[in-house]
Each structure stands twice: as structure tokens, then as C-alpha cells.
Amino acid sequence: MAIRTRQSQRRRQVLTRERIVETAVELLDEVGADALTVRALTGRLATGPGAIYWHIGNMDELLEAATDAVVATALATRPAQPAEAGGAAGEIRSVALGLFDAITEHPWLAAQLAVQLIRNPWGPVTLRIFESIGRPVRALGVPQGDWFTTTSTLVHYILGATAQTSHGSGDGSVPGSEADRAEFLDTASRAWQELDPDDYPFIRAIAEQMREHDDREQFRSGIDLVLTGITTLHVKGSAPGRLPRPSTA
């Protein structure tokens, strides 16, 4: 009995909230949100469900903690912008690309970010993202009355665009590898090129561009378009289209 008690104490000492969250992220990357269960966690951590619930209230809280942990890491290690694209605009680009790269690495993240933004706007994930975007928006010189709308526009573009281009949904609806993606785009491009030229002249004209486009570069271009609009509309003394164009990170 004494040996069993000492073993249980050691297990509780090793099992921490941080370790549970880290393991949850690993399982989410491997099997997706639908397969993240207490049974899967207890099997991976060699513990019982009671120990899991001691640290994590329920699965919704665990998903929130896992999402926040990945977002925090992404923002702490986000890509550096070149010197000529520094300042507040460069900070926004850096945050955006950090989130884009995180969602590319963790395909389950896009759906969880949408859930947190809609259902839990007072939670840590939403607060972290809005603060990271909102501070440089304020530094751009946007009037205070437009802070919420401007920041929301950026957040919605970032999360919407990354969700659309995230790979590996696990249900077969999104190409999960570079080879799958290339085949998917080739099929779509050929379908566009075969459309009636009188009904779809524009679609036919961009079919080859769609085949060859790079998701990350397209995302960066979208951020630049939004930032150009923000500075043109709100920042005194700015000239349309004068935001510096960063080099590829």
C-alpha cells in the first residue's frame, strides 16, 4: 500500500496542466479535435481520468487551453519583418504571418480559433489576438473611434483567409499535402479554362494564376491591401498605395 501511494504521489507531481495541454496539442495534430478524448489522454499520459479532470475542468476548457498555448507560441516566435517594413504595419504583418504559419502547422487550429472568437470573446484566445493586432493599429494613428472596426476587420481577414487555405482537414474535403494541393489546383484550373469564354471571360483569364499561386504569398498580399486601405482612410498625411512591400520571409 505504501509503495502504491508513493507511486501515485510521483505521478501527480509529474502530471501538470502544462503537460496535459502539451499532450492535447500532440493528439490534436495527430488525430484532430473529434478524436481528442479523455481516454486518449489517459492512454498517452499513463494516468486516470480523475487526474486529468483535476487539472482541466472539461474538454471545452482543454481545447481552449490548447488553442491558447499554440497561439501564444506562434505570437512569441512569429516571423521577423525586414527593416524597411518595420513599425506598426510590420508588426501587424508579423502577427498575421505567425498565425498563418501556426494554422498551417496545426490544421485543427483554424476551427478552434473561430469557435473561440464567436463563443468566447472574453476568453484568453480572443483577447490575445485582439491585443496583438489592436496595439499596432493604435500605433498606426487610427482614430480611437475606429479602433474596434479596424482591428476586427484585420482579425476577420486573418482568421478567414487562414481557415480557407489551411490543409489537412481530415475529411477529404481539403487537400492535405503539397502533392494533393497541386493536383487539386491543376484540376480546378483546367475546369476554369474549359468554361464558356462568353459567360466567364474573367475566370478563364485567371485560371493559370490560380494554378500557380502560393497561399502564403497571397495571404501576405491580402494583408498589404487591408493595411493600405486602413492608412488611406484613417491616417493623416498618408498617400494611397504607399505602404512598403516586404520581401518574402
Image (cartoon, rainbow, N blue to C red):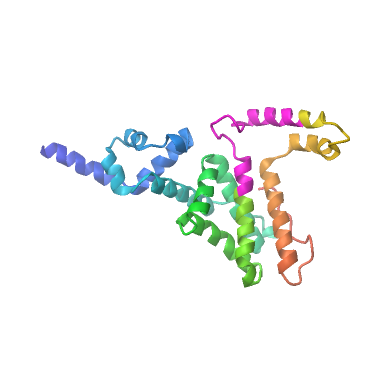
Looking at the image, is 14 positioned above or below residue 241? above
Residue farthest right in this picture: 198
The residue most toward the left is: 1
Is residue 80 among the parts visible in the rendering? no
* Residue 242, magenta (yes or no): no
Left or right? Give the position of 150 relative to 243.
left
Which is more toward the observer, 7 or 170? 170
Residue 69 screen position, x and y as percent: 45, 49
Location of residue 94 by image quarter: bottom right
Question: Is 17 left or right of 34, judged from the image as shown?
Answer: left
The residue sitting at 38% across, 44% down in the picture is 59
Q: Does residue 188 show up magenta in the picture? A: yes
Which residue range is magenta in the image?
160-189
Residue 148 in the image: above or below residue 28: below
* In-image side of 249 versus 40 (left or right): right
> Can residue 184 be seen here?
yes
Residue visible at 44% across and 49% down in the picture: 64
Which residue is more in the foreground, 202 or 136? 202
Main secondary structure of the magenta stretch: helix
Where residue 196 sits in the image (x, y, percent)?
Answer: 85, 31
Image location (x, y in percent) of residue 223: 68, 53
* Picture mark count: 0
**x, y percent for residue 238:** 76, 68
Q: Which residue is drawn at 54% across and 39% down?
A: 107
> Does residue 67 sit above or below 136 in this rendering?
above
> In which quarter of the view is residue 210 placed?
top right
> At x 10% / y 37%, what residue is drawn?
1
